[in-house]
Amino acid sequence: DTEVTQTPKHLVMGMTNKKSLKCEQHMGHRAMYWYKQKAKKPPELMFVYSYEKLSINESVPSRFSPECPNSSLLNLHLHALQPEDSALYLCASSQDGGAATGANVLTFGAGSRLTVL
Amino acid sequence: DQQVKQNSPSLSVQEGRISILNCDYTNSMFDYFLWYKKYPAEGPTFLISISSIKDKNEDGRFTVFLNKSAKHLSLHIVPSQPGDSAVYFCAASRSGANSKLTFGKGITLSVRP
């Protein structure tokens, strides 16, 4: 299994809703990532989990709350979002977050397209 | 401040010809450079990488060249095929634990049959 699976593919939510994005990988990767991508822009890093511990938070607003229940799963809990948070949210995983030598190659999921009304 | 720059937003080439996609970077601490390809409605897919201690890496039709003194790299696709039409992202990272991947804005490649 060489895939990163993200659900749901599309999500529409109001500003008062609470929802979650889910990500799963079964490649034995120990680092998992959330990226945000707006149209015509590069993916921007939000969070990194390494060995199930949060290792990087790129100053993301608290209305985004990541969770890593185990080494295969990564969630992004959403609450009180703003319309400008509408974007494609990409999950990725890598073998060890770059701890070993060699390029830190990320495997991405297809993304969850979020629309905040 | 964009540390990885892809200044040309798009490129159109004829099938069978060479596609050359360029990328510049500003951070001399980057150790690895990667190219990703992205089709619509899919996530980015890893293509090829190069270490900063090398100047060339080849994988089938794809070759990446690195000019460290100019802080410039390029991806060559030979021969180009219509299925190569996609958005190509250049990315860079430092080695070590918790290394972050910094992406350029991407180049849209169109290969005409």
Image (tube, coloured by chain):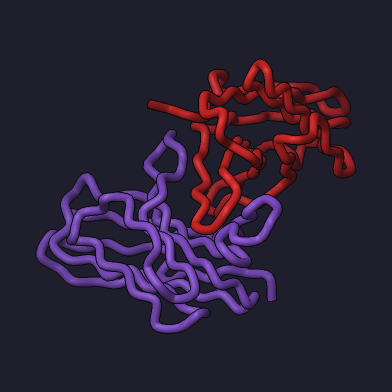
Chain colours: A purple, B red
Camera-side residue of B31 and A85: B31
Residue A103 place in picture, x, y as percent:
67, 50
- Horizontal placement of A13 versus B27: left or right? left
- Horizontal placement of B67 versus A5: left or right? right
Residue B87, visible in the rendered structure: no
Q: Quadrant of the C terminus of chain A?
A: bottom left
Residue A110 place in picture, x, y as percent:
53, 59
Residue B108 place in picture, x, y as percent:
59, 30
Camera-side residue of B96 and B77: B96
Vertical arrangement, residue B37 with respect to residue A28, above or below: above
Name the residue at the top extreme: B70
- Horizontal placement of B70 versus B55: left or right? left
Residue B27, visible in the rendered structure: yes
Name the residue at the bottom extreme: A70
* Residue under the point 43% across and 67% down: A49
Camera-side residue of A98 and B8: A98
Camera-side residue of B64 and A2: B64
Vertical arrangement, residue B55 with respect to residue A38, above or below: above
- Horizontal placement of A62 versus A12: left or right? left
* Residue under the point 46% across and 72% down: A23
* Residue under the point 52% across and 29% down: B27
Residue B98 place in picture, x, y as percent:
49, 57
* Residue under the point 56% across and 75% down: A25
Quadrant of res B10 = top right
